Amino acid sequence: MSNAVVSAFKNKQLRKKLLFTTLILIVVRFGSQLPIPEIDSAQISAYLKSTLGDSFNLLNSFTGGSFMQMSVFALSVTPYITSSIIMQLMTIVIPALEEMQKDGEDGRKRMAKITRYVTVVLAVIEGAGLAIGFANQGALGTNYTTFTIFTMIIALTAGAVLVMWLGERITESGIGNGISIILLVNIVSGMPGDFTSLYNQFMKGKQIGPALIAGCVIVGVVLAVVVFVVILSDAERHIPVQYSKKMQGRKLVGGQQSNIPLKVNTAGVIPIIFASSIMQFPIMLQNVLKYENNGFIGKALTSLNSSTWFDASHPKRSIGLLIYIVLVILFAYFYTSITFNPLEISNNMKKQGGFIPGIRPGKPTVDYLNKILKYIIFIGAAGLTIVAVVPFFFNGVFGASVSFGGTSIIIVVGVILETIKQIQSQLLVQNYSGFLSE
């Protein structure tokens, strides 16, 4: 990895792309600190802390702390990510979108254009929801007007659209993966503060021995989770494919061997995002509406809060943890089923004269791929669950509350690995270009 980065800085074209990407990221971080006009950000921040507590940690991590500060980039890349997920799901429901997705470069451009429009609509809806919700709860003060709400909606929408545009500029003129890199920087920007809070909580003011032990445990847990995520992200099951020989003119061609790489973590972080959203939505709604119920509904909502899952004094609240695990596994199967089509792969292999050794083409191949896929999805979902639950365990048992969790670590590791691969591929292409020009 370090060799790729050093080589990239030595290459003139890649160095320009890296510098351009860095300048864009500086603009993003500057916008994350820029307050919305006519809005008291400190008052809104205090309101969010008092009402939502840890419920918005994931969103605040994705926005690099912008949501907590309610800056111009408070929505950041979240509308675009939601729009992308919606468009992926819609390709299964709407045949026209599915055909568009398969229609080469032109189809991808049209899909990207629709995704942008959906992003703008979602940004307007989310901005309006936040502005009207804050106004109804008194977070905007007593002197707010309709113009204040309108200004907040326009600022949040413009910020989300600008972040999307900056991400596309990184993709086109930078090192690629623009939205993912912005998301990565947002998450990483909050980590120094989290580690500082861990230091103040477990190490500061204590004797050298206990402080060193606490520091080693913190570093060891973080490294173990990162290594586990790297293994989970790169793990693949290769299914061998043999292509039959055929005559072309007077020559016998074909007969090559290949493989179908099936990623263990096929769905990525999508199952965790979906499960977390479903678990946190009732809690956020209860806090915003200030609904209090000490009966069955109140206890049920409390069990959905991740901070109570490892509370030894209330073991029944672990039911929320079981629901969360079931949701992660279900969404892993669901998302993989709509993004990976064994029937399509089987038909493509059959058209190209390929087959899996020992498996007949057609339905037996589809059944074989489905069988392998079920095992792989379960292993990937189990790995995702472990990564996601580890921060909840240390939060519940030791009170180690941080803004980033398993989801953020998976995103950080995945984006870094993908960016390094892109840099290496660009270096390889430019080396070949230089060789051909000579």
Image: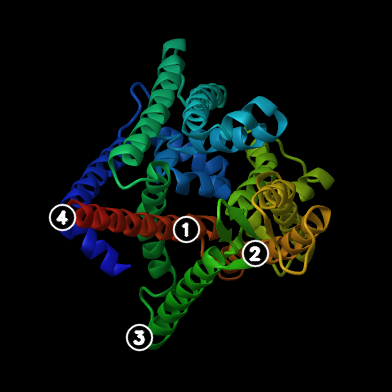
Which numbered disc flags the more N-terminal residue, 3 or 2?
3
Location of residue 21 in the rendering, given as x and y in whole percent from the top left corner? 27, 45
Give how far apart the Cα atoms at labels 3 and 2 are. 62 Å
Up the image or down, 71 lies above or below 224; here it is above
Q: Which residue is more in the foreground, 391 or 353? A: 353
Q: Which residue is more in the foreground, 49 or 88? A: 88
For the point 39% across and 53% down, the residue is 190
Tag nearer the camera, 3 or 4 = 4
Location of residue 236 in the rendering, given as x and y in whole percent from the top left corner? 59, 66
Residue marked by disc 2: 242
Q: Are marks 4 and 2 in contact (CB under 8 Å)?
A: no
Q: Is residue 305 left or right of residue 46?
A: right
Residue marked by disc 4: 438
Residue marked by disc 3: 208
**Picture quadrant where residue 219 is located:** bottom left
Q: Are marks 3 and 4 in contact (CB under 8 Å)?
A: no
Location of residue 152 in the rendering, given as x and y in whole percent from the top left corner? 42, 22
For the point 65% across and 33% down, the residue is 91
Which numbered disc flags the more N-terminal residue, 2 or 1?
2
Which numbered disc flags the more N-terminal residue, 3 or 4?
3
